[in-house]
Image (cartoon, rainbow, N blue to C red):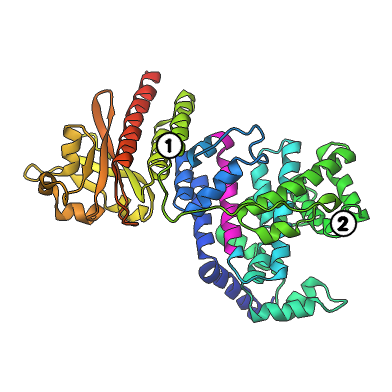
Amino acid sequence: MNPSKRNSLDEWVRRVSEEEMPIFGHTVQQVVSVAEDENAPIAELARVILQDASMTARVLKLANSVYYNPHTQQISTISRAVVVLGFTTVRSMCLSIALVDSFVQGAPRDRLTRELARAIHAAVQARTVALVRGDESPEEVFIATLLYHLGDLAFWCFSGEVGDRLDTLLRQPGITPEQAEMEVLGFPLRQLTASLVKEWRINDLLSATLRNPDSKEVRSRTITLCHQLARAAEKGWEGGRLQQLTLELAEITGQSDKAVSATLHQNARDAARIAGYYGAAAAAAVIPLPRGEQVVGEEELNIPEYPEPDGMLQLRILRELALLLDDPQSDFNLVMELVLEGIYRGTGMDRTLFALLTPDRRGLRAKFALGGERDALTGSFHFTRHPQEENVFFQLLDKPAPLWFDPVRRQEQRRWQSHQLAEAVGRAPFFAAPIVVNGRAIGLFFADRALSERALDEESFESFKHFAQQAGLGLGHLAQRRR
């Protein structure tokens, strides 16, 4: 490749990464960094998802689908989804939703819709093949297959007038896609895919398959065969090419071609439903179904900007907390994450935070938070005892009792107002409650509705107190079990 073509490719990588898909790139980096850190708690993945209300709703929708949850075990929280379905499955959902969200908000193009439909269809087929084979990580296969034509997806979403020129050229007879891409762009779109995958450090399997698409290695072969199958199915499920691909997949899985054919048909139905769960209704509608079946449309998810109080969700989360405490694999971080999610989503708060006392009990530091502006809140929420200065949080911890802080309505609280408090949490009313384990306060929960400016109320305060109490009881239970 000559230097001008290299510059052209580099410019597209920069444009996609920094201008067109920065949110996807940021989400990928967050999820990948959690996955690469062996010491990171599973709960950290839940926090990455919970900061996005749309992603939260879609992950839970997927987690309760028959495709991911065949035993239909009700999953009400992201924390529980990670425990029940596993880290890699929820991570896969997270990356997939971020990807689809990036493209469905772009310019509507027929080629983009078809590419996205093929990607989702092929990924669902490949994951099932990997499961049947007993693959050690079917989700890695799923993500690698979903992103196998990432460059094509990004190009058709953001290409503008250049895309119009390539589209016109592709319609001419006798020209291959790669020839047309070289003519218009100076590089094939598969190179854009490879560069984006390298830039975002997404998936080693995907990188290896892109380097050698003709590899006979079974996982790479699964990826390429399933993409060929998704494309062939668009011409009908009875075609000769599709029958040939069915035989090749039967060889990989060790099943009969009849059994594989039935599975492929069901996978197509699942793919259309999952595309709908992702929010890609247009792509769902063009995934080819067997025997001319029609896609059953999914209801649009109603996703409020801020969580609304939900009594039924509170009860389900409390049940999930009881199940978690019976699980020998549960730990401090998982318990606290589930309680935080209960306060945030069940009680309907804008932001909530858990803070721990330092071992000498002279400092109070945020450990993790959920909701809007969580990083800013976590960064500012740190306090140190001073003998000459009253602090509302240390008062609450020394004489453990829940607090509804609203000095405008409660004059006796005005002595706790301070510049430091306002700098840390703002001036809106808030709830705070100590976490008491075996009679001793170890930290506290904080929650408010400062961002939406919604009023706090007595019912929400009672729910908040109950979650804080259950956290203390749960941590006490864990401590006793480990003695």
For mark 1, give the secondary structure. Answer: helix
Mark 1 neighbour density, 10 Å: few (under 14) some (14–19) many (20 or more): many
**Residue at left offset 76%, top offset 42%:** 129
Q: Quadrant of residue 322?
A: top left
Q: Is residue 86 left or right of residue 468?
A: right
Residue 182, position in %: x, y?
74, 77
- On-image quarter of the C terminus: top left
Residue at horizontal 66 percent and vertical 49 percent from the top? 274
Residue bearing the label numbered 2: 236
Q: Are marks 1 and 2 in contact (CB under 8 Å)?
A: no
For marks 1 and 2 on the same chain, the one whose residue lies earlier in the sequence: 2
Mark 1 vs mark 2: give the one in front: 1
* Camera-side residue of 281 and 82: 281
Q: Up-down: is 149 above or below 446?
A: below
Magenta extent: 84-103
Q: Which residue is mark 1?
A: 314
Q: Secondary structure at mark 2?
A: loop
Q: Is residue 25 above or below residue 471?
A: below
Give amino acid for label 2: Gly
- Using the image as rendered, state which of residue 127 and residue 397 is in the foreground: 397
Q: Which quadrant would the N terminus be assigned to in this image? A: bottom right
